[in-house]
Amino acid sequence: MGDSMSFIGDIIGDITGATAAGQAAERGAATQAAAAGAGIEEQRRQFDKLVELMTPYITAGTGALTQQQALIGLGGPEAERAAIERISGGETFKALTAQGEEALLQKASATGGLRGGNIQAALSQFRPSILNALIEQQYGRLGGLTESGRLSSAGQGASGMTSASNISNLFANQAAATAGGQVAGGNVGRQMFSDVLGIGRTIAAF
């Protein structure tokens, strides 16, 4: 009996077009859901690529910030001493102090003040002045890297929020499409029942 009713329902559905309409609606819903799923995967892929591109800048910025903190003592005395020693032991400091001290001595020799107090005072102040200038210069250079890392981190965070919002919307679209397909499938049965009644009434009229 059940198979007969199903067979009759299929025939009526084919005659009235209810079955075809329901199947088309379900296929459309499946296509829409699949498109939303593809969009979700693409959003994730693009965000992962952005993270990959931004990571070197964020890493460099984090390292630069740590070095800045060390230079001004925020990393503790050991870190501060090590940071300053890296500068004072570097080739730039050695070259600048050697050239500067040689120039001071040559000037003092030319003016006959090689043993005077002024030249001794100048020599004693020269190295600390150079070191202080190099520390300030290094801090500024590190600041550029720190800012680059900050901007990259902020950009990544903003992109993450946008991606999360887009994915959430696509999930909602996917769910709506799936639900729409299910509703369309359910409507086929109701439409065929209505068609059966209509056909019955038409036959009875004769």
Image (cartoon, grey):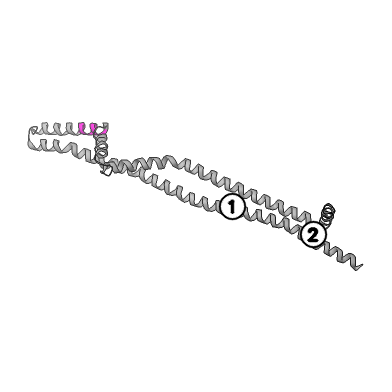
Q: Residue at x 71, y 57 (%)?
A: 184
Side of 29 where 12 appears, left or right: right
Left or right: residue 202 compared with residue 102: right
Q: Is residue 89 above or below residue 192?
A: above
In-front residue for pair 80/10: 10
Residues packed near mark 1 inside 10 Å, few (<14), some (14 to 19) or many (20 plus): some
Question: Farthest residue in the bottom direction?
Answer: 205
Report the span colored magenta. Answer: 92-99
Residue 32 pos. (x, y %): 65, 51
Disc 2 secondary structure class: helix
| The N terminus, quarter of image | bottom right
Q: In which quadrant of the rendered image does the C terminus lie?
A: bottom right
Amino acid on which the number 1 mark rests in the picture: Phe
Residue 86: give its label: none
List the residue tagged with mark 1.
171
At horizontal 42% and vertical 47% (from top left) the residue drawn is: 153
Identify the residue position indicated by label 2 in the image. 192
Q: Which percent across, then down, holds residue 147?
A: 37, 46
Residue 134 place in picture, x, y as percent = 25, 39
The answer for how far apart the CA atoms under marks 1 and 2 are is: 32 Å
Q: Quadrant of residue 191?
A: bottom right
57 or 192, nearer to the observer? 192
Q: Element under label 1?
A: helix
Magenta: main secondary structure equals helix
Q: Is residue 96 magenta?
A: yes
Q: Magenta span has 56?
A: no
The x and y percentages for residue 26 are: 71, 53
Q: Is residue 177 left or right of residue 187?
A: left
Q: Amino acid at mark 2?
A: Met
Tag in front: 1 or 2? 2
